[in-house]
Image (cartoon, helix red, strand yellow):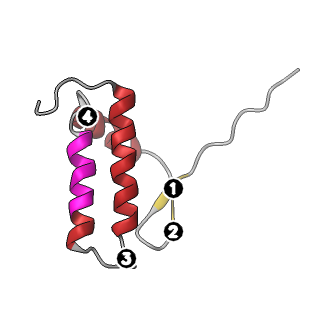
Amino acid sequence: EVFGPVKPSRLVSRAAEEMSELVCEVAGDEWTDAAREEAADVVIILTRVPGLMDAVRAKMEINKKREWKFNGDGTGYRVKPPRPTEQP
């Protein structure tokens, strides 16, 4: 590790800082070199999360079985099942 040990809360904070920089660099519908560089910074930071790739693979298997609402812009949201109503 180049930077030494890091607490999870600080790692998440740094990732959020880099994500904010990425948001500022994204211009319209084009990926600029600067935006790609900021995206790389986010990924580099997140790769320090122990077991991340295993968690990503497991989550993708869960997501494949879920129902999704597509937005028509290449993104979507999971359709959450209704919550059971509480009985008094």
Q: Earlier in the sequence, mark 2 or mark 1?
A: 2
**Taking the image as drawn, is residue 64 in sight?**
no
For marks 2 and 3, give the CA distance: 20 Å
The picture quadrant where one finds residue 51 is top left
Image-based side of 46 in relation to 69, left or right: left
For marks 2 and 4, give the CA distance: 27 Å
For marks 2 and 1, give the CA distance: 8 Å
Image-based side of 24 in relation to 44, left or right: right
User: Element under label 1?
Assistant: strand
For marks 3 and 4, give the CA distance: 29 Å
For image coordinates 37% across by 53% down, the residue present is 19
User: Per the image, is 43 magenta?
Assistant: yes
Question: Which residue, given by chain and number where applicable, does mark 1 sit on?
Answer: 77
Q: x and y percent of residue 65 in the render?
A: 42, 45
User: Per the image, is 12 magenta?
Assistant: no
In front: label 3 or label 4: 3
Q: Nearer the viewer, residue 1 or 50?
A: 1
Q: Magenta residues?
A: 37-46
Q: What amino acid type is highlighted by mark number 1?
A: Tyr
For image coordinates 45% across by 73% down, the residue present is 73
Question: Which residue, given by chain and number where applicable, does mark 3 sit on?
Answer: 27
Q: Residue furthest top?
A: 88
Question: Which residue, given by chain and number where applicable, does mark 4 sit on?
Answer: 52
The image shows residue 80, relative to residue 54, as above or below, that is below
Q: x and y percent of residue 77 in the render?
A: 51, 55
Which label belongs to residue 71?
Answer: 2
**Mark 2 and mark 1 residues within 8 Å of each other at the beta carbon:** yes
For image coordinates 20% across by 45% down, the residue present is 44
